[in-house]
Amino acid sequence: MENVSVDAIGEGARILDVREDYEWEAGHIPNAVHIPLDQLPDRLDDLDPDQDLAVICRSGGRSARATQWLESHGYSAVNVTGGMGAWLEAGKDMVSENGKEPTVV
């Protein structure tokens, strides 16, 4: 499994966010795909197997498990080191679904 830093994710990268709904609503990356980790097996068809995925969660644990699982099913995926915490610290774009300032919970 490959780990990448938030700085290594280029514009237009396909980002898969595997956090829970309440985490997503508080703050997420614009245009990311949201599939909570426990829903991934049932929603695998939502993802394009020919597209490289950068998988992210809050700190990197859930995304590491998701990345390994995706790779075992033939997908190309990398784990984002430090997760959304690192994304926020790097000052990268975020949006929220709750009308508040985007944050990581």
Image (cartoon, helix red, strand yellow):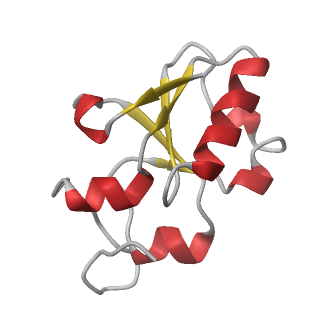
Callout count: 0
Single out the residue that lies furthest toward the right. 42
- Is 8 above or below relative to 30? above
Q: Name above or below for residue 56 compared with residue 22.
A: above
Left or right: 43 in relation to 101? right
| Image x and y of residue 96, in percent | 35, 73
Q: Residue at x 39, y 61 (%)?
A: 28
- Whether residue 93 is visible to the viewer of this picture, yes or no, is no
The location of residue 42, given as percent across then percent down, is 84, 44
Q: Position of residue 84 (x, y in %)?
A: 39, 57
Closest to the observer, 48 or 101 = 101
- 3 sits to left or right of 74: left
Q: Dividing the image into 4 quarters, which one contains the N terminus? A: top right
- The picture places residue 68, in percent across and down from the top left corner, at 70, 29
Image position of 103 (left or right of 63): left
Up/down of 87 relative to 54, above or below: below
Residue 105 can be seen in this image: yes
Which residue is painted at 30% across and 40% down in the image? 6
Of residue 33 and residue 23, the one placed in the foreground of this image is 23
Q: Residue at x 36, y 47 (%)?
A: 31
Q: Is residue 105 left or right of residue 93?
A: right
Task: Please tell me in which quadrant of the rendered image residue 12 appears.
Answer: top left
Residue in front for this viewpoint, 94 or 97: 94
Q: Quadrant of residue 49?
A: top right
